[in-house]
Image (spheres, rainbow, N blue to C red):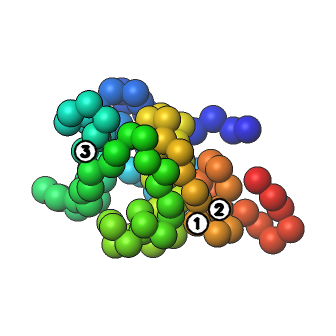
Amino acid sequence: MEQLNILENGTGPVCIFEPGNATRYELLCLETKPGLDLFVWVNAPGGGKVTRLAQDNHITAWWFCNRLNINDADCAALLAWLRYVRGYTVTMPEGYGHDGRWLREGVTA
């Protein structure tokens, strides 16, 4: 398995994440109270996508994409980060591997 490329405070509250899909993600995930995280993807100057996540919940790609109003490629990368860095249980979008990368036809994760 390839390592996820996490730069600058990879396990701290602010993280620059480059998963290998030609995208750079600025992420923030803070525990706001026991068992509840605030997740922020800063994807625009002065703003971004925000949601709260219960640490013991399974996060599905369908829910996450709809909650943040994002596409499958970004969803897969962000879910991979939540899985490996924050320890969440996730279901990836169809066609994407556990590392958030698109699987070529005939290749399995």
Q: CA distance from mark 1 to mark 3?
A: 22 Å
Residue type at tag 1 = Pro
Q: Which residue is mark 1?
A: 93
Q: CA distance from mark 3 to mark 2?
A: 25 Å
85 relative to 63, above or below: above
Of all residues shown, which one is farthest toward the left? 46
Q: Say which residue appears at 41% left-offset and 30% top-offset.
A: 10
Whether label 1 touches label 3, CB < 8 Å: no
Q: CA distance from mark 1 to mark 2?
A: 6 Å
Whether label 1 touches label 2, CB < 8 Å: yes
Determine which of the numbered discs, if any, sits on residue 96 in the image: 2
Q: What secondary structure is found at the residue carrying circle 1? A: loop
Whether label 3 touches label 2, CB < 8 Å: no
Residue 97 in percent (x, y) is at: 68, 55
Residue 88 in percent (x, y) is at: 48, 41
3 relative to 74, above or below: above
Are there few (<14), some (14-19), or many (20+) residues within 10 Å of tag 1? many
Are there few (<14), some (14-19), or many (20+) residues within 10 Å of tag 3? some
Image-quadrant location for residue 71? bottom left
Residue 77 in percent (x, y) is at: 51, 54
Determine which of the numbered discs, if any, sits on residue 25 in the image: none
In the picture, measured across the screen, residue 61 lies left or right of residue 39, that is right
Q: Which residue is mark 3?
A: 38
**Residue 6 visible, this orientation:** no
Residue type at tag 2 = Tyr
Between 19 and 82, the residue placed more toward the observer is: 82
Q: Say which residue appears at 44% left-offset and 35% top-offset.
A: 86
Residue type at tag 3 = Leu
Between 5 and 81, the residue placed more toward the observer is: 81
